[in-house]
Image (cartoon, coloured by chain):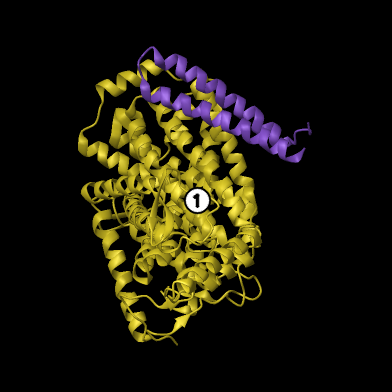
Amino acid sequence: MDKLSLKNKIISVNSLLFIIIGIIIIIRSINLHAWLPVIVGISFMGYGIYRTFYVLKYLRGRQ
Amino acid sequence: MNDNTDIVTPSQPTHELRRDISVWGSYMWGYADVGADIYAALGLVIAAAQGAASLAFAAAGIVYIMIGFAYTELASAYPIAGGGQYFALRGLGDFWGFVTGTALLLDYTIDIALFSVASAGYVNFFLPYFGIDPTHFILTLGSLKINYLWLTESLIFIFFLIWLNIIGIKESSLFNEVIGAFDIFIESSVIVFGFLFAWKPEFLVQQWQMSFPTLHNFMYGSSLGIISFVGLESISQAAQETKRPATIIPRTSVTLIFTVFIFATAFSSLSLGVLPWQTFAEHIGDPIATLAHAIPYIGLIAGPVTALLGATILLISANSGVMSASRLTYSMSEFDLITRWFNKVNPKYKTPVRTIVVFSGIGIIEMLLSFMTPQAMDTLGNMYAFGATLGYLIVFIALIRLRFSDPYTPRPYKMPLNIKMRYKDRTIDFPVLAIFGFLGVGTILFEVILTHKIGRIAGPIWVLLGLLYFIYFRKKNNMPVTKSIKRNWEAHQMDVLTSAEEFDLAEEYRLALKERDEKLKRNGQTKPEK
């Protein structure tokens, strides 16, 4: 697999951070039945996963 | 030059706008607007929607996602400067193209005024560090109290941006990219630190239950929420200057749609889980700085950093306004909706200098007038919401119409949720999501008219004045007013795709037209008039 460029490393770390924060928001909100923050958490996770796939797709394209 | 029967091929200008914006540059043009809007809108929306501010942002955000999908489809299919105005022109004709252009032009000129003023306001945060009290610079004229220091700073900013845009797109794109990257980093830091160390979901729930707004307040809040979402229009505006636009624009736009939605809902959810809504109502001018100040570890330095951030990102947004207004008027003059005097590109810098100077000048006038009202920011925000919703509403209609009237143009991206149907012996993808988008934007426009006292009067007056000019201009030049000038859109579309170096799409388009012509020939029919 090709090495990650600095830009893609930043995107990867950023994506992971979004996924982790998404999980934290969901766990802390779900017991309170606060559904809007749960949706925000899911959005964070979804965005993180989307960016991760974006980097993977980019790397696959360069192989 | 034109009469009602001639078919005109829209010309390629002698000096074209240079194509030198990359993926990152295109993304930053959009982010420059959107990132700054949340700085201005957060306090206003929370003050109106109170404990339900997150819901107000989410409601406006969902509508915005649909707007984003529509713009992505249209900007990648028709990669030419003009944005919503061009799409309305193609789909609905000259009259509606002009109405859309006028509404969006109102937004861009106000964008210049609003964000230059707001940026200067953040700069004033630093003046006490140098022993200067900005509140001492007040000029009293009867009942008017004008802060002439703030006014002068705003004027300097606008003149700086005019100069920057006259020099050329490459320089101003670089300016956006560098400062925008810094701003994304700081905004992300506030969100990450905030959710990790300061956010209390039980407090958010308490505010939701105890401070749920009245219907009127919620409508006002959610309609103001839409002012956070004008970024994608900038990408369309930059389409003519973007390299390989059909490839780049879908990637840029979809990423931007997600970023915008997440930032808007995250900031509102975070804010109400950290501080009471009343605190934000008292700090409408600097809500993000107030929020950042309440976050542990970064709170001590949050004031100066977020003030710097606010000043820079708001200046970027004002820059987007100058850029987009000039490109929009360039496009309108190119299609004889306004005088061709505007479409002259400077031979030295290859930028539309006249449009930059004139419409930034209008932005200056709007800024001066707003300083004469009790709340300048609120006045400008009201009109901003009116222009955006009116423009977007017409764009949705144009998108639906174009699916039927121009099915031959290749669409590298299509709005999700389509139903296949037969129309004139051809299979058409009917955009169901565009119907929902139309209803969503229509609801927000209704809210604006119902709840925005200045926007519902000044906005329509602007459009009406524009229409009077349109009638005068078209009659003077012997052009139809309610009907469209007949244009050879097919040749024009081929020129656009070829000049964008989208050769695959150009070939696909040529084959689709050839197939249509052969089918018509077999049936003994002639080519439909465009």
Q: Residue furthest top?
A: A31
Vertical placement of B157 versus B463: above or below?
Answer: above
User: Callout 1, which amino acid?
Assistant: Thr
Q: Which chain is purple?
A: A
Please state which of residues B422 and B477 is positioned toward the viewer in this rendering. Answer: B422
Q: In the rendering, at what x and y percent does residue B326 appear?
A: 50, 65
Chain B hue?
Answer: yellow
Position of the N terminus of chain B, as image quadrant, is bottom left
Using residue B330 as the reference point, say whether residue B497 is left or right of it: right
Residue B249 appears in the picture as rendered = yes
- Residue at 44 percent of width and 50 percent of height: B70
Residue tagged 1: B72
> Is disc 1 placed on a helix, strand or loop?
helix
Please state which of residues B303 and B530 is positioned toward the viewer in this rendering. Answer: B530
Vertical placement of B247 versus A55: above or below?
Answer: below
- Residue at 65 percent of width and 62 percent of height: B503
Q: In the rendering, at what x and y percent does residue B477 appear?
A: 38, 85
Chain letter of mark 1 equals B
Using residue B210 as the reference point, say whether residue B312 is left or right of it: right
Please state which of residues B238 and B282 is positioned toward the viewer in this rendering. Answer: B238
Using residue B246 as the reference point, say whether residue B50 is left or right of it: left
Residue B287: name its quadrant.
top left
Using residue B258 as the reference point, say whether residue B378 is left or right of it: left
Q: In the rendering, at what x and y percent does residue B458 appear?
A: 27, 60
Residue B277: name its quadrant.
top left
Q: How many marks?
A: 1
Residue B153 appears in the picture as rendered = no
